[in-house]
Image: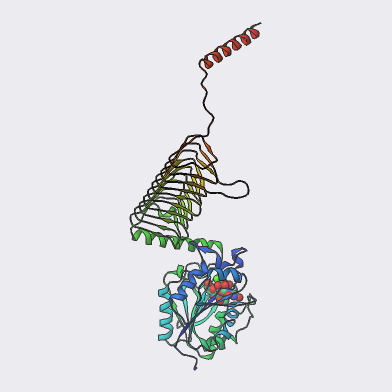
């Protein structure tokens, strides 16, 4: 056997499968785990090994998949028809004509594999000078996995898929992870010898083990202790199990780094999120996407924060939704506020109950405490936005901006008919509908003047009394 060479490493990720068991329109590998498509976890591990090349075998939904993997070092190859894992690896053959070395085969649907296990696989593979080394593990329920069949001396004999296994083989608890280190020359030579004569009519990559043994090649295995690492995600139950595992890992990591999480069972934080020390997270919170939260913040119950940057010492009170926002230090938001995309809230600002803000900048120390809609607005520093203030930003065709300069005082129940500009230090009388720009330091008031009619109520009361008396007399007759 002269197949063995130990130079270089190429990673192949199998990701063309149809993922039928997900019952989805979306390719399986794009289903998300803790906020990221499952394939991105596998690609990250591949890249961390600094291989010469990383090749992903993909089938349908090519553009969608490429969109998520924007890494120039990753190459793609198409497997037009999904005829099995062996067939998928064969699709890479032409790309690797000039390569000679170790190929690490990963599965797009086995995303939790640790970098330590991959290093160990390659180490053992190279130290033992194997032609193929496979990661296996022992599980209590091997359902759905290929079973590892050994001879009476414990040597690897073959891997048999569940659908092709005998009742005795099915009882084996040692399963194939679908992850292998394999020597290039052996791999492509052996692939030529496999057939699709099995229950599924597929070309199984695992069959190269039988080929190797027949040809006298050296086959090895390494075991991983934690089966979750090699868990294959084939259906939505497994997707949620992997999600739970990643979530727990993330929360542990945050807690070990100084974040208080009252109830980890009911806190949902995506992998990419960063949170500073001494921040406290109450239960039933969802912190998602590329969100950064600073130190000493308090995130109260029932809050959802997506793709946002939150500074230090910020309090987000109960029931808020923040999406794509930038919240500076010492801000207080909520309860029940909705911060929509492209909003910047300046240092020390206070946003209160039932306030919705969209595509707006709120200056330092400005307050909008109650029941307001602020859309397409730029509000300066130290302004006060009274309860019930509405920016009427949409005329049915276009959106218009409202500009409110520093120190403006807006009385309650004001409507700004945008576009409109309120000068620095101006005061808007409560209940006004502002249709024109207001100069700095002016008072703008647009409500109808009040009229008081003395004694009017008394006259009304006596009229009501006499009407009531008449109707009683009528009934009495
Ligand atoms: C496979 C293994 C099984 C192992 C399990 C571990 C084979 C024959 N079986 O089974 O022994 O226990 O993984 O999770 O290898 N793929 C392609 N093209 C295809 C078919 C599959 O790219 O034509 C890709 C899939 O996208 C997936 C991976 O290969 O990422 C594994 O395919 P899947 O159909 O999920 O295999 P399993 O039945 O899980
Ligand atoms: Ca699988």
Can you name the residue that lies furthest to the top here?
Answer: 477
Can you name the residue that lies furthest to the front here?
Answer: 439
The answer to whether 372 is drawn above or below residue 71 in the figure is above
Can you name the residue that lies furthest to the bottom here?
Answer: 2
Ligand 2 appears in which quadrant?
bottom right
Q: How many marks?
A: 0
Is residue 167 among what the camera can see?
Answer: no
Residue 3 at x, y percent in the picture: 50, 91
> Residue at point 46% right, 77% down?
135
Q: Quadrant of residue 427?
A: top left
Q: Is residue 246 left or right of residue 234?
A: left
Quadrant, the C terminus: top right
- Figure coloring: rainbow
Seen from the viewer's position, the closer of residues 238 and 75 is 75
Seen from the viewer's position, the closer of residues 103 and 448 is 448
Residue 394 at x, y percent in the picture: 58, 47
Residue 168 at x, y percent in the picture: 54, 74
Residue 293 at x, y percent in the picture: 40, 56
Is residue 300 among what the camera can see?
Answer: yes
Seen from the viewer's position, the closer of residues 117 and 227 is 117
Q: Is residue 346 left or right of residue 392?
A: left
């Amino acid at each position: 056997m002269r197949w063995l060479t130990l130079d270089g490493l190429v990673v192949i990720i199998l990701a063309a499968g149809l993922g039928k068991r997900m019952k989805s329109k979306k390719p399986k590998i794009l289903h998300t785990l803790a906020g990221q498509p499952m394939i991105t976890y596998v690609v990250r591990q591949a890249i961390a090994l600094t291989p010469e090349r990383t090749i992903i075998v993909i089938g349908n939904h090519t553009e969608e998949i490429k969109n998520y993997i924007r890494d120039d070092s990753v190459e793609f190859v198409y497997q037009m028809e999904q005829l099995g894992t062996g067939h998928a690896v064969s699709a890479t053959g032409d790309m690797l004509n000039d390569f000679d070395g170790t190929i690490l085969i990963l599965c797009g649907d086995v995303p939790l594999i640790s970098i330590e296990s991959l290093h160990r696989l390659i180490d053992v593979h190279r130290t033992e000078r194997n032609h193929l080394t496979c990661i296996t593990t022992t599980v209590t329920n091997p359902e759905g996995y290929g079973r590892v069949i050994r001879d009476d001396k414990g040597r690897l004999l073959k891997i048999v898929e569940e659908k092709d296994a005998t009742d005795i083989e099915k009882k084996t608890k040692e399963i194939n992870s679908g992850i292998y280190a394999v020597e290039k020359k052996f791999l492509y030579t052996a692939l030529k010898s496999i057939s699709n004569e099995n229950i599924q009519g597929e070309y199984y990559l695992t069959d190269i083990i039988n080929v190797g043994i027949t040809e006298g090649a050296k086959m090895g295995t390494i075991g991983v202790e934690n089966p979750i690492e090699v868990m294959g995600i084939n259906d939505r139950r497994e997707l949620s199990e992997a999600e739970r595992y990643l979530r727990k890992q993330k929360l542990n990591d945050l807690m070990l780094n100084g974040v208080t999480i009252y109830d980890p069972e009911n806190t949902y934080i995506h992998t990419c999120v960063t949170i500073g020390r001494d921040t406290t997270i109450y239960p039933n919170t969802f912190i998602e996407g590329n969100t950064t939260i600073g130190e000493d913040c308090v995130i109260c119950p029932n809050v959802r924060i997506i793709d946002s940057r939150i500074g230090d010492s910020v309090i987000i009170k109960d029931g808020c939704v923040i999406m794509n926002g930038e919240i500076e230090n010492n801000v207080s938001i909520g309860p029940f506020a909705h911060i929509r995309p492209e909003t910047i809230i300046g240092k020390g600002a206070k946003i209160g109950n039932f306030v919705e803000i969209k595509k707006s900048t709120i200056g330092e120390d400005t307050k909008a405490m109650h029941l307001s809609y602020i859309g397409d607005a730029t509000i300066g520093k130290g302004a006060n936005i009274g309860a019930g203030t509405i920016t009427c930003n949409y005329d049915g065709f276009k959106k218009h901006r409202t500009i409110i300069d520093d120190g403006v005082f807006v009385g309650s129940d004001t409507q700004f008919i945008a576009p409109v500009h309120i000068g620095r230090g101006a005061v808007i009388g409560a209940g006004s509908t502002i249709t024109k720009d207001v100069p700095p330091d002016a008072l703008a008031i647009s409500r109808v003047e009040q009229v008081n009619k003395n004694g009017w109520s008394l006259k009304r009361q006596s009229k009501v009394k006499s009407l009531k008396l008449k109707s009683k007399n009528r009934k009495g007759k």
